[in-house]
Image: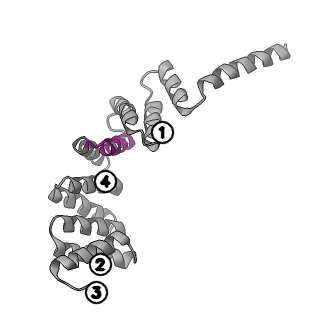
């Protein structure tokens, strides 16, 4: 009897293993036998995003958000995937939704602020990055990002204190060094 049980278990294992030869087949099989599976939809989307398959990830994040519209991580990664797919306005909308769910998350506010700046929406970008600075006042990156956006917005004088603070907090921060030189050059100042 034990031998028959072991043979049956071995056959069942072989059938399951054939379904799970890679991540895609594992996720696709699971989704084919379940409905409204928030965890699998999100994890499959995340796995695809990690492999830079943003176009394939988006439908899975969308499905996760259909199931749970306030799922913070799915909102953020949907925004990131859309941004990587060259859809900045849609990405901004998802980052905005993520900020509404967790207004104290400096990371998503940073993503949103930098994307807004790339889209030329400088006042909205600086508002987001000022909020990041309020949340993380001793972050060299927060000061550097705000200084860089102020420089992009044509405000080199306002950018300099943030860039200097970034370099005080993290000497050698390349982006801050480069932007400080550009800001000082725009004002005709010499580096200090």
Cα–Cα gap, marks 4 and 2 = 22 Å
Pointer 2 or 3: first along the chain = 2
Label 4 crowd bin: few (<14), some (14–19), many (20+), radius 10 Å: many
Of circles 2 and 3, the one toward us is: 3
- Residue 146 rendering spot, x and y as whole percentages: 25, 66
- Secondary structure found at label 1: helix
Regarding mark 4 in the picture, which secondary structure is present there?
helix
Nearest to N terminus: mark 1 or mark 4: 1
- Residue at point 29% right, 78% down? 164
Earlier in the chain: of badge 2 and badge 1, it is 1
Vertical side of 73 occupied by 170: above or below: below
| Residue receiving disc 1 | 47
The mark lying in front, picked from 4 and 3, is: 3
* SS assignment at label 3: loop
List the residue tagged with mark 2: 164
- Is 114 on the left-hand or right-hand side of 33? left
- Identify the residue shown where x is 17% and y is 59%: 122
Structural distance between the alpha carbons of marks 2 and 3: 10 Å
Q: Residues within 10 Å of mark 3 (few under 14, many from 20)?
A: few
Classify 58 as above or below 138: above
The residue labelled by disc 4 is 111
Q: CA distance from mark 1 to mark 4?
A: 20 Å
Task: State whether the magenta stretch is mostly helix, strand or loop.
Answer: helix
């Amino acid at each position: 009897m034990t031998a028959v049980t072991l043979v049956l278990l071995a056959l069942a294992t072989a059938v399951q293993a054939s379904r799970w030869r890679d991540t895609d087949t594992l996720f696709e099989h699971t989704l084919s036998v379940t409905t409204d599976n928030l965890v699998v939809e999100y994890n499959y989307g995340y796995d695809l995003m990690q492999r830079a398959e943003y176009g394939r990830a988006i439908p899975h994040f969308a499905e996760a958000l259909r199931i749970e519209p306030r799922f913070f991580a799915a909102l953020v990664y949907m925004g990131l995937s859309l941004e990587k797919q060259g859809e900045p306005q849609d990405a901004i909308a998802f980052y905005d939704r993520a900020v509404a769910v967790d207004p104290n998350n400096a990371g998503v506010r940073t993503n949103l602020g930098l994307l807004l700046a790339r889209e030329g929406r400088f006042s909205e970008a600086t508002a987001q990055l000022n909020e990041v600075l309020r949340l993380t006042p001793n972050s060299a990156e927060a000061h550097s990002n705000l200084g860089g956006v102020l420089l992009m917005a044509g405000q080199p004088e306002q950018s300099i204190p943030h860039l200097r603070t970034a370099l005080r907090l993290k000497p050698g921060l390349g982006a801050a060094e480069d932007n400080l030189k550009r800001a000082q050059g725009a004002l005709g100042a010499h580096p200090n």
